[in-house]
Image (tube, helix red, strand yellow):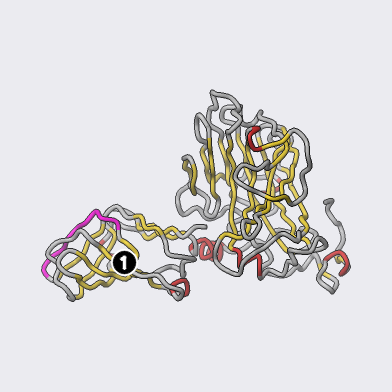
Amino acid sequence: MSTLNVNTINAATSGQGVAVDVKNPRSFRNLIINGAMNVAQRGTSGSGAYGYYSVDRWYNFNNGLNENPTIAQADVASSTSPYNLGFRKSLKVTNGNQTGGAGAADQTFISTTLEAQEIANCGWNYTSTSSYITLSFWVKASVAQTYYGYLKAPDGSNYIYPYSFALSANTWTKITKSIPGNANLQFDNNANAGLEVGIYLFLGTDLTASSGSSDTWAAYSSGTTRTLDQTSTWYTTNDATFEITGVQLEVGSYATDFEHRSYGDELARCQRYFQIQAGDSDAYIEAGKGQGTASVDAGHSLAVPLRASPSVTLGSNRVFRHDGYSDSTATPTVLQWNDKSPMSSVIAFNLSGHSSITSNYVCGWCPKAANLKLDSEL
């Protein structure tokens, strides 16, 4: 859809029932969290078969690769178009060396997933073909070719909307895509995965087709065709790069200027899904209570309430008794999680593997020589 260079858009275009002031669009319109790529709690760079490696809320999946790509938070160069619009960080993918070439089962993509309730309550009439949601982003690649993006809705019938975009080499380009609703779409009013927004950096022919159409919703399954056949040049170029920033998803048939949010606000949004507590200091002591002689039930204050019961990563922890302390390398387990827990700013752990604990005695605990990581990603 071409850019609309007007100050106001009629209700028939906006679908909102009143004239819309493009220069002063509504706040909180961007459904994407960390679209400016400013938050990277896990670190600035990482790599693996699949997972979250750097920029918060952005996932990378790889299958069949000879060498997995590196996912990093990168700096946006000054004097570029995104920089001039206030973007300072990007998510950068650096390809590995795919010595085996482009295999039929190979795939690599990046994505971010929104909760179903965020789509159910956003105001998009997603079962109507005359109601739109619009995706926009800035993107740059070292290889000129056609790339494919997608939206995927796993609730109900599980549908996917693929689309393509062409890039010149090493040139920042703004992509805007307006996507209509479909009668088969379903978004449950819960905190589970609702809408996946991603980009395929490469899909092998097991998951593509030589003919067909893009820009339409279609049924999705694990072995279904996802896009038309993809150019493999980027994928077979060692150390090829792909950068993206300024990702915005908003209700309506046109893209507004990116909604820049403060770092603190974006960090808090990210911490609903992942948060980290520094270790290696006795200053981070929190309260606990002895359970038998070898374990402690202990509380931990959350930065913000978590989306769901988290997976816990902690290399070691220390319990302070009335007569000394005890160290353990056992990973804490979540003591309790119920329907009220996602509203709570405190979580309870059981810390096992300790010694000389006195049951029911108050004690203290803290992470030791490692960071406490709580992962509640979709």
Tell me where residue 262 sits by quadrant.
Answer: bottom right
Q: Position of residue 110 (x, y in %)?
A: 59, 45
Horizontal and vertical percent for residue 50?
Answer: 49, 44
**Which residue is at a point 57% across and 40% down the rendered structure image?**
93
Three-letter code, disc 1: Phe
Q: Would you call the spot at circle 1 few (<14 residues within 10 Å), some (14-19), or many (20 or more)?
A: some
- The residue shown at (27%, 67%) is 285
Percent x, y for residue 299?
32, 71
Toward which corner of the image does residue 30 lie, by quadrant? bottom right
Q: Is residue 360 magenta?
A: no
Is 287 left, or right, of 301 in this rendering?
Answer: left
**Residue in view at x 14 percent, y 66 percent:** 293
In the picture, measured across the screen, residue 208 lies left or right of residue 282, that is: right
User: Residue 44 or 126: which is nearer the viewer?
Assistant: 126
Indicate whether 342 appears above or below 311: below
Instruction: Please determine whether, in this image, residue 211 is positioned above or below residue 367.
Output: above
Tell me the quarter of the picture where residue 333 sits.
bottom left
Residue with the mark numbered 1: 349
Which region is colored magenta?
Answer: 323-331
Is 311 or 244 nearer to us in this picture? 311
